[in-house]
Every structure is written in structure tokens, then in C-alpha cells.
């Protein structure tokens, strides 16, 4: 199994964890207002999006190096762009937040940054892996 396929398997694991956050019986993950880590308001749609992305990653990793590279390229572009839009407007497009909520004002820039870092990091690392993981 190539390094790129192993990275894609790592994305499968990471995205499955993200999809399961609302359902893990671990104190401190979901606060009394329903926010994961006090920042993310994850709903069933978000969970399904993370699950679909995880299954896409698993399929790509199991199929081939090329499929993994395609996954990392498209996933990376989508998630990174979603993070950039979230930084600019407070809402992303993957969950249709920009259409549903429009511009959203966070209490501080640090909270806005924290809310978007996961998509920026996952997307950026995926794009870098796809680019540098060429054969």
C-alpha cells in the first residue's frame, strides 16, 4: 500500500471520528448547548457529510493510488475552500450554511478561526499530499 493510500486511510479514520462526535459518550466533547468542544454546532447533516466523505476516502484507499490522489485533490479543494469561505463570511458551503444563515458573526476572530481550522487543515494537507504524492 502506497503512502498516499495510507494517508487516505487516515482521512477515513479522521472523518469517521468527526462523524461520530455527537454520539460519543465522552465528557467534554459536547457541551450543554450542543456544541462540540464549545465551538462546532454539528447536526445530522454535518454528520452525514462527514460519513459520506469518510466512505469516499475508504473506497479510494482500497481501490488504488490514483483513486487516493483523486480523492485527496477533490476533497482537499472542497474542504479548503469551505474553510476559506468560513473565515471570510462565518458560514461554509458544504453544509449550505452560507445559503441558510448567510454571513455569521462569531464572538471573536479566534473562535471563527478555531471553527474553520479543521477544514483548512484537512483540505490543505490533502491538497499537499495529492500534489507531492504523485508517482
Image: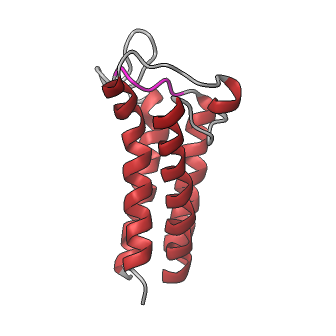
Residue 63 in magenta stretch: no
Residue 41 in magenta stretch: yes
Q: Is residue 88 visible?
A: yes
Q: Nearer the viewer, residue 80 or 13?
A: 80
Identify which residue is drawn at 50% across, 36% down: 88
Q: Nearer the viewer, residue 126 or 48?
A: 126
Q: Position of residue 135 (x, y in %)?
A: 42, 90
Identify which residue is drawn at 62% across, 40% down: 93
Identify which residue is drawn at 54% across, 22% down: 104
Q: Position of residue 118 (x, y in %)?
A: 39, 43
Q: Quadrant of residue 46?
A: top right
The colour mode here is: secondary structure
Q: Residue furthest bottom?
A: 135
Q: Quadrant of residue 128?
A: bottom left
Q: Position of residue 11 (x, y in %)?
A: 42, 58
23 w.r.t. 133: above or below: above
Q: Kindly report the secondary structure that dominates the magenta region of the rendered protein.
A: loop
49 w.r.t. 68: above or below: above
Q: Which residues are magenta?
A: 38-42
Q: Residue furthest top?
A: 32
Q: Nearer the viewer, residue 7 or 55?
A: 7
Q: Nearer the viewer, residue 26 or 96?
A: 96
Q: Quadrant of the N terminus?
A: bottom left
Amino acid at each position: 500500500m502506497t503512502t498516499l493510500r495510507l494517508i487516505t486511510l487516515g482521512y477515513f479514520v479522521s472523518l469517521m471520528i468527526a462523524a461520530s462526535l455527537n454520539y460519543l459518550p465522552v465528557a467534554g466533547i459536547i457541551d450543554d448547548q450542543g456544541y462540540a468542544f464549545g465551538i462546532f454546532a454539528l447536526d445530522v447533516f454535518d454528520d452525514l457529510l462527514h460519513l459520506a466523505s469518510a466512505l469516499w476516502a475508504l473506497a479510494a484507499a482500497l481501490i488504488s493510488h490514483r483513486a487516493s490522489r483523486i480523492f485527496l485533490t477533490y476533497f482537499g479543494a472542497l474542504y479548503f475552500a469551505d474553510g476559506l469561505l468560513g473565515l471570510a463570511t462565518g458560514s461554509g458551503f458544504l453544509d449550505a450554511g452560507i445559503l441558510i444563515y448567510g454571513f455569521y458573526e462569531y464572538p471573536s476572530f479566534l473562535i471563527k478561526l478555531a471553527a474553520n481550522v479543521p477544514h483548512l487543515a484537512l483540505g490543505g494537507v490533502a491538497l499537499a499530499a495529492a500534489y507531492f504524492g504523485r508517482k
